[in-house]
Image (cartoon, rainbow, N blue to C red):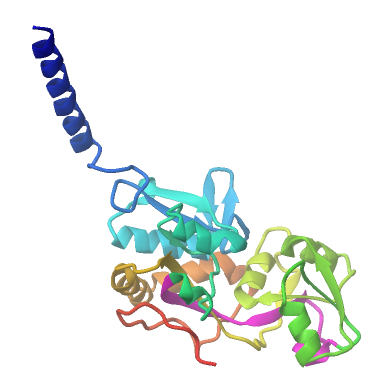
């Protein structure tokens, strides 16, 4: 009799488990195959990926929302995950995120461990200066000037090595700290990708005070980071193409960085994508 009772309990437990799985979508609620998609973004880049309390703003997040919606996920079913630059490959490899929109440049070395859809924007290294500055028009006009970038970045050293050997390099912990130094007159310019600089110039504190020079000297293709061996590139590229065709891509860019007067490179943007995953940039 005891064995019969045990058997009935086990059977009932099994039925209940099946019913629970049916009600929860037969999978984890934090998987792209379940109810929620986990999207990696930056939390500290105004105009691109920025956390403001419970709100997540910026061009990267707007593109991510559009793509997620086309894949069948509304705003309530997106889980935003902070994805620092140094952690992005591991986060994809370990399944901590399903995709990453975080000024994530497509490179040959990264393609060895992750896949990329896109690109959804092609940026270029540029300079941020005070609004009334007329002396600095490009990297070759920085000799004798103080140029700020973040610790660990190679962008300022690239200027020194290729364009202005006597430029004085200043390192800060963040680009926001560089902007503080620029506003205080402690440095003459800040350098990184043009759209990142435009986002910084578009904040309320800097609005009308700073400008992006508009003379890019590199190409950085921002892709959608995906786990290696993905089958999502075609659907994501289709969504990005649709965003461009409907005008939503242009609207998102204007909304997030338009206050800076930023003009993107129209020879490289907006993207026109095929169905395949991105490949390494040509050397």
From the top left corner, tell me how far across and down residue 7 is, in percent: 12, 18
Question: Does 200 sit left or right of 51 as displayed?
Answer: right
Q: Residue at x 81, y 62 (%)?
A: 180
Front position in the image: 147 or 10: 10
Front position in the image: 91 or 233: 91
Task: Residue 200: name its quadrant.
Answer: bottom right
**Magenta-highlighted residues:** 115-142
Above or below, 235 against 18 in this view is below
Asked if residue 128 is among those painted magenta in the image, a careful observer would answer: yes
Which residue is at the far top? 1
From the top left corner, tell me how far across and down residue 269 is, in percent: 48, 83
Q: Residue at x 53, y 48 (%)?
A: 55
Task: Residue 277: name its quadrant.
Answer: bottom left
Quadrant of image for the N terminus: top left
Front position in the image: 12 or 37: 12
Whether residue 161 can be seen here? yes
Whether residue 137 can be seen here? no
From the top left corner, tell me how far across and down residue 4 is, in percent: 8, 13
Q: Residue at x 43, y 48 (%)?
A: 79
Above or below, 256 against 262 in this view is above
From the top left corner, tell me how far across and down residue 147 is, in percent: 82, 77
Above or below, 33 against 257 in this view is above
């Amino acid at each position: 009799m005891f064995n019969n009772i045990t058997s009935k309990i086990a059977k009932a437990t099994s039925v209940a488990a099946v019913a629970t799985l049916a009600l929860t979508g037969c999978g984890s609620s934090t998987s792209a195959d379940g109810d929620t998609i986990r999207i990696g973004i930056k939390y500290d880049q105004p105009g691109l990926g920025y956390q403001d309390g419970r709100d997540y703003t910026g061009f990267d997040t707007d593109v991510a929302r559009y793509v997620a919606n086309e894949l069948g996920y509304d705003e309530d079913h997106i889980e935003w995950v902070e994805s620092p630059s140094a952690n992005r490959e591991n986060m994809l490899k370990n399944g901590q995120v399903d995709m990453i929109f975080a000024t994530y440049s497509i490179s040959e070395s990264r393609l060895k461990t992750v896949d990329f859809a896109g690109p959804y924007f092609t940026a270029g290294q540029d300079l941020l200066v005070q609004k009334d500055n007329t002396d600095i028009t490009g990297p070759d006009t920085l000799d004798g000037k103080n140029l700020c970038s973040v610790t660990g970045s190679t962008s300022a050293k690239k200027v020194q090595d290729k364009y202005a050997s006597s430029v004085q390099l200043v390192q800060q912990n963040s680009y926001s700290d560089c902007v503080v130094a620029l506003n205080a007159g402690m440095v003459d310019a800040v350098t990184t990708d043009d759209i990142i600089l435009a986002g910084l110039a578009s904040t309320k504190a800097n609005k009308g005070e700073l400008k992006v020079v508009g003379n890019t000297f590199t190409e950085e293709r921002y892709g959608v980071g995906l786990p290696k061996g993905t089958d999502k590139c075609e659907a994501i590229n289709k969504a990005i193409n649709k965003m461009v065709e409907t005008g939503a891509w242009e609207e998102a860019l204007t909304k997030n960085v338009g206050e800076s007067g930023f003009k993107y490179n129209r020879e490289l943007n907006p993207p026109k994508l095929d169905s395949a995953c991105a490949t390494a940039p040509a050397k």
